Image (cartoon, rainbow, N blue to C red):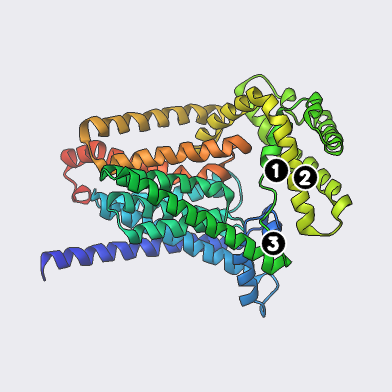
Amino acid sequence: MHPNTESQKLTRTYSNLLLIISLGFYLFFAFYDGAVICVDSPSYIEMNISREPLYPMFLAFLRFVFAGTGADFYLTAAAFLQSILAAVAAWSFSVFVGKKFRLHKVTPLLTLLLSFAVSLLCRFAAQRGSMYSNSILTEGIAISGYLLFFRWMMDYVLEPSRTKLLWCCVLVFLLVSTRKQMIFSLALLILCQLIVYGHKKQLPKGLGAAFLCASGILLSCQLLDLGYNFALRGEAARHSGDTRFITTMAFYTAQREDAAYIEDEAVQKLFEEIYDVCAEKGYLKNAAGKGWSDRVSHFGDYYDCIQIDTMWPMINAFAKERYGKDIVALNVYADEIMDTINFSVIPHNMSKILSTFADNFLSGLVTTVAQRNPILNWYSLLVYLLYIVLLIYHIRVVKDQKIILFSLLTLISIILNVGLVSLVIFCQTRYTIYNMALFYISLLLMADKPVLGRLQVYFHHPFLKH
């Protein structure tokens, strides 16, 4: 047999083995835990108008397919499909790393194990009681979708083609239609197009291509949103409530006298009523402690108390007095109320908002790589320093452009995601987990030659050879 054929056979065997391991891992937890209902799950199951369309549509499709079975069997089916998606995404990424970076044979397996480790941390260390892959949440598909997007995006940057760009665009469309947070993936794709065309010295063409891709993706997201609500509610309307996160930040940093900036008297009175409830119960920034840890903990502890327990019900009740049971009209008016509060109050509290953003951003950097506690905060600082040192080492010494690009884009992805989340909500792991596996995979790739390479020299172990 020709040596190359034997090598290809070995590679296929190795790849198939990794796929079997990945499927076994994720499906085991799907069997063990089943479909896990979380606090936000009912809003997706009930197809709430405040949710992006794709995940409710996914659940509705499964509910239709399994209509003849038990009442909740479709949720079990969703958990299994999400687990298969997670397995395929982790496997695909590990095989991609093995082929593109041509490092040691152990690297794809370690890459896969890092994806497993992130899932296990969520299941056990974070004490969630389940992995996201079998939770009825958008993270059930968005985390895997983002890993697939990053895989295709890297493939496009390293070896550009229209097919790879198309895959990237489709995945961004699916991600943004699943979670508004995933708009940062569009920003990352635009950056990659500028890198590709800038390298070719065709930057104007790159700007044009980025504009066309972004326009097509955003238009497709809008059309899906409008079509979904038209089919479900008889009116071509977008999902509502996007600004409620900004309004929560507005209340958290406001003073009661800021109501004077609101010209609409009815909305001004509503603002004061909501503010008084939040202030009395100690939800607002002026009740937070002085240290960074105390401030971040206070914001995270009381964010949902402001939005879900107080602001959202009171604004909805206010809107319902004028629009009754007309869901679309009620939510459009609620959005208008929140926009009025945002534009009136936020400009007068920018310093406090920026201060809260800075606290959140630092917290998000920690929760991207670990959990927030006194010991792991120091660990996070050290592991980021290690990351930067290895990156500088690769730029100055190793000069492996593929690994440099992978590590830089991972770091940019972390900054974009944490920055976006920090502006509007507290940075719990659920919102920052998208880059956790990528961060440690980047560390693995950067350590491969300076660390594993030295082990190969010292020990000459055949498992470490290329």
User: Which residue carries the number 2 mark?
Assistant: 312
Looking at the rendered structure, the secondary structure element under dot 3 is: loop
Residue 244's disc is 1
Question: Residue placed at 75% from the left, 58% from the top?
Answer: 328
As shown in the figure, which amino acid type bears the numbered disc 3?
A: Met
Q: Residue furthest right?
A: 321
Would you say 275 lies left or right of 15 here?
A: right
> Total label count?
3
Would you say 433 lies left or right of 345 here?
A: left
Looking at the rendered structure, the secondary structure element under dot 1 is: helix
Which one is earlier in the sequence, the residue at label 3 or at label 1? 3
Which image quadrant is residue 445 in? top left
Q: Residue furthest bottom?
A: 68
Question: Residue placed at 53% from the left, 42% from the top?
Answer: 432
As shown in the figure, which amino acid type bears the numbered disc 2?
A: Trp
Looking at the rendered structure, the secondary structure element under dot 2 is: helix
Q: 455 or 427, which is in the foreground?
A: 427
Which one is earlier in the sequence, the residue at label 1 or at label 2? 1
Say whether residue 255 is visible. yes
**Image location (x, y in percent) of residue 282:** 78, 29
Q: Are marks 1 and 2 in contact (CB under 8 Å)?
A: yes
Could you classify mark 2 by the number of other residues whose Cα lies within 10 Å: few (under 14), some (14-19), or many (20 or more)? many
Question: Residue placed at 70% from the left, 48% from the top?
Answer: 241
**Image location (x, y in percent) of residue 198:** 30, 42
Vertical side of 460 occupied by 299: above or below: above
Question: Residue placed at 74% from the left, 41% from the top?
Answer: 338
The quadrant of the image that shows the N terminus is bottom left
Residue 47's disc is 3
Q: Are marks 3 and 2 in contact (CB under 8 Å)?
A: no
Would you say 8 lies left or right of 370 here?
A: left
